[in-house]
Image (cartoon, rainbow, N blue to C red):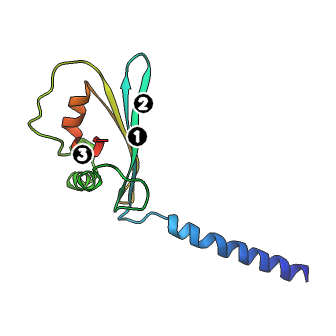
């Protein structure tokens, strides 16, 4: 009897875990990135972060999600090739900003970080992706 109860309990436990594991598994089309912007002044002061999901989910959204996803797709997920905002002119002010992206782009792992001379340069290079 104890053997039957143990087998039944193990089967029920496995059945409750299976749907959660299947739902959480990323697909080749899944993009879920944590985007962070940090200003470097007197140490590191985090400006903010946001999650970017492509396609959209019911989670809190990036304020320019559609444009950010389109920009990432245009660059094939390569943050160094983002279309940005061509033609934007920035001052020579030195106020460094470090941008980072960590997560998954269409099933591929992403771990990208880059420091720009100031917020204008960062926006000019990354466009809607880091516009939050």
Q: Please name whichever residue, 35 or 110, is drawn nearer the observer in this view of the structure.
A: 35
In the current view of this chain or complex, which residue is farthest to the top? 42
Residue visible at 90% across and 79% down?
2
Work out how far the residue at label 2 is from the one at label 3, CA to CA, in angstroms.
Answer: 19 Å
Q: Is residue 51 left or right of residue 18?
A: left
Specify few, some or many for label 2: CA neighbours under 10 Å numbering under 14, 14-19, or 20 or more. Answer: few
Where disc 3 sits, the SS reads: helix
Left or right: residue 57 compared with residue 121: right
**Residue 42 percent across, percent down from the top left:** 42, 16
Q: Which residue is mark 3?
A: 128
Distance from Cα at disc 3 to Cα at disc 1: 14 Å
Q: Mark 1 and 2 residues: CB-CB less than 8 Å, in contact?
A: yes
User: Which secondary structure, mark 1?
Assistant: strand
Q: Residue at x 27, y 41 (%)?
A: 131
Q: Which residue is mark 2?
A: 46
Name the quarter where the C terminus is drawn: top left
Structural distance between the alpha carbons of marks 1 and 2: 8 Å
In-image side of 66 versus 107 (left or right): left
- Give the image location of residue 93, x and y in percent: 21, 18
Q: Which residue lies under the disc numbered 1? A: 49
Residue 106, given in percent of the width and then of the height, sits at 35, 59
Find numbered disc 2 in the image and state the secondary structure of the residue it sits on.
Answer: strand
């Amino acid at each position: 009897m104890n053997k039957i109860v143990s087998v039944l309990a193990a089967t029920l436990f496995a059945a409750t875990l299976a749907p959660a594991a299947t739902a959480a598994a990323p697909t080749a089309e899944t993009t879920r990135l944590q985007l962070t912007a940090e200003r470097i002044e007197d140490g590191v002061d985090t400006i903010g972060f946001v999650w970017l999901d492509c396609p959209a989910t019911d989670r809190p959204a990036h304020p320019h999600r559609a444009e950010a996803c389109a920009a990432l797709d245009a660059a094939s997920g390569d943050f160094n090739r983002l279309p940005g905002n061509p033609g934007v002119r920035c001052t020579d002010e030195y106020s460094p900003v470090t941008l980072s992206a960590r997560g998954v782009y269409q099933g591929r792992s992403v771990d990208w970080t880059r420091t720009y001379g100031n917020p204008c340069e960062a926006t000019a290079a990354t466009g809607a992706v880091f516009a939050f």
